[in-house]
Image (cartoon, rainbow, N blue to C red):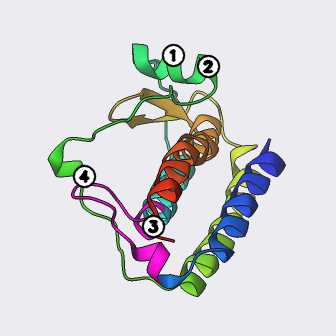
Amino acid sequence: MILNDLKLIETYKLFLRDYSLEQLRYIPEPEVWSISQMYDHLIVVAHEYLDSAEACGLASEEQTQEKTTFGEYLFNIGGFPPIKIKLPPELNASPDNEKKKEDLMLELDHLMKRMNEVKMKVEKINPNYKVKHGGFGWLNAQEWLNLVAMHFRHHLRQKYELDQKLPV
């Protein structure tokens, strides 16, 4: 699975190469992110998910609690449903819109390297050691790792919508 996940991130890197700095930072309307902000969000959240995957390895006892109903649904369909998800204001800080294309590339490279490292650890973590996600319930290390790619796939739709709004 990790190979497909890395190919997905490689695809994001290919897309990134085609944007000018002005296009990356272009905010089409109030309360809509720029492409740069979307990339920043994806990278930040991916690292949070990887932190949680690693935290599962530090658990001292098996967790019997399960996912929420939405969490079960999410993992049963293998991804986020095709809806826009609005986070509560306290979790919805605007992502960084000041990074250069090169910075985002380096951050994506670092993320891919870290995903490989975490994948090696995840294989050794008891699947009953879990960390709670605020919306999805209790997830094990493999589920946290899978969530990275699910989140990247979910934002492809947003990327295409943003592309349609770019000035020519």
Residue 73's x, y, as percent? 51, 16
- Tell me which residue sits at (73%, 59%) in the image: 11
Residue under label 3: 40
Q: CA distance from mark 1 to mark 4?
A: 23 Å
- Give the structural element (helix, strand or loop) at label 3: helix
Disc 3/disc 1 C-alpha distance (Å): 27 Å
Q: Position of residue 70 (x, y in %)?
A: 42, 19
Q: For the view shown, which residue lies furthest in the right direction?
A: 3
From this viewpoint, is residue 57 visible? no
Q: Nearer the viewer, residue 147 or 21?
A: 21
For the residues labelled 4 and 3, say whether their Cβ atoms are less than 8 Å apart: no
* Region in magenta: 22-38
Q: Is residue 37 magenta?
A: yes
Local crowd size for mark 4, using a 10 Å CA cut-off: few (<14), some (14–19), many (≥20): few
Q: Residue at x 38, y 35 (%)?
A: 84
Q: Please say if the residues under marks 4 and 2 sit with CB atoms less than 8 Å apart.
A: no
Instruction: Give the spatial CA distance, label 1 vs label 2.
Output: 6 Å
Comes first in the chain, label 3 or label 1 = 3
The question of residue 85 being in magenta is answered with no
The first of marks 4 and 3 along the sequence is 3
Residue 43 seen: yes
**Label 2: element kind:** helix
Give the residue displayed 44% in from the left and 28% down from the top. 138
